[in-house]
Image: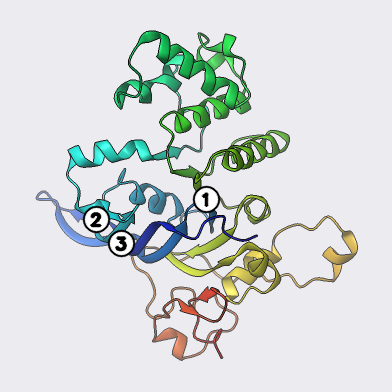
Amino acid sequence: MKPRGHDTLLDVRQLKVYFPVTRGLLRRKVADVRAVDDVSLQVHVGETLGLVGESGCGKTTLGRGIVRLIEPTAGQVFFEGQDILTLSSGQMRRLRRRMSLMFQDPYGSLDPRQSAGSIVGEPLIIHNMVQSKAEYQERVEYLFRRVGLDASMIDRVPHEFSGGQRQRIGIARALACDPSLIICDEPISALDVSIQAQIINLLKELQQGTKGLTYVFIAHDLSVVRHISDRIAVMYLGRVVEITDSDTLYDNPLHPYTRALLSAVPIADPFVEEKRERILLRGEVPSPLNPPPGCPFHPRCYEATLECKETIPQLSNVGSGHEVACIRAGR
């Protein structure tokens, strides 16, 4: 798949998100947890960028750092041409209507004391998007219909909905202010497989029907990400190790970590499944509190050399927009 737009909506440059570790009565800082470490990537208008990797690799922290729900330690985030990390809280508040976050847990992300209608309509009030009660009601009903929910459900509370319906409420809330960017933080991982397909199809339909709607889709399931993403970025220990279009990533993965991830994705054809190589990684993911020197993947890499232990590889373009952070990949 090709990006639907050519303009850059989001440009992340050398973003770092560190969490301090303190000790003692005076809470003296002794180290940093490097949750996101020097990440750079671009997202184009109208495309979906998939963000994948093992649990704990920094995907969610990166997504929240991009929209400043977590304040980054260093770097730049250009959204619609403006570095949002330099904005004041008031300026950021005005800009937030242009970006939304869709949460992972459809059970915990909705206030159980609010009605579904007030959950969806709350952003309209916060950002002064409606001028009257009638306009508010009309807009909320429209949002319900847009995500496939009956407008008669507006007065129900979250526990009266199924998991899939709750996630649709979350999507309606994310769409309320007509954002240009939605960070989808593993929005289907807590749902049944059949419901996952419905939510993925809904997100694709909404994107096709809305000019310029852009997603950053965070997930750990590579088979799901392939169906919705135009490009995919693979993260390991807080860093992006490979980024390219989804077809190229699956047909020609260059980073050893990406190849290992893809080898674990089940294939429906038993004959192909039996013959393909399964790559088993040794050891555990290192701690972001004390990452290894050199390439962060080298302690588990089956192709590591002495140079890998000494040099931190940077993302480099190996052709046609395919970027990989591996010393051996470009040779």
Q: Which residue lies at the image location 60% right of the left edge and 54% below the top edge?
A: 229
**Front residue (pair 237, 87):** 87
Residue holding disc 2: 21
Q: Mark 3 points at which residue?
A: 16
Q: Mark 1 points at which residue?
A: 46
- What residue type is disc 2 on? Val
Circle 1 packing at 10 Å, graded few (<14), some (14-19), many (20+), is many
Q: Earlier in the sequence, mark 1 or mark 2?
A: 2
Q: Crowding near pointer 2: few (<14 within 10 Å), some, many (20+)?
A: few
Q: Which of marks 1 and 3 is in front?
A: 1
Which scheme is used to colour this image of the protein?
Answer: rainbow
The residue mark sitting in front, 3 or 2, is 3
Task: Check disc 2 and report its element: helix, strand or loop.
Answer: strand
Image location (x, y in percent) of residue 47: 54, 53
Image quarter where the C terminus lies is bottom right
User: Helix or strand or loop: what does disc 3 sit on?
Assistant: strand
| C-alpha distance separating marks 3 and 2 | 16 Å
Which corner quadrant of the image does residue 40 belong to?
bottom left
Looking at the image, is 198 positioned above or below residue 322? above
Residue 113 seen from this side: no
- Verify CB contact (< 8 Å) between mark 3 and mark 2: no
Residue at x 46%, y 58% (from the top left corner)? 43
Where residue 52 appears, as percent x and y from the top left, is 54, 57
Q: Quick check: can you spot residue 72?
A: yes
SS for callout 1: loop
Q: How far apart are marks 1 and 3 (CA)?
A: 26 Å
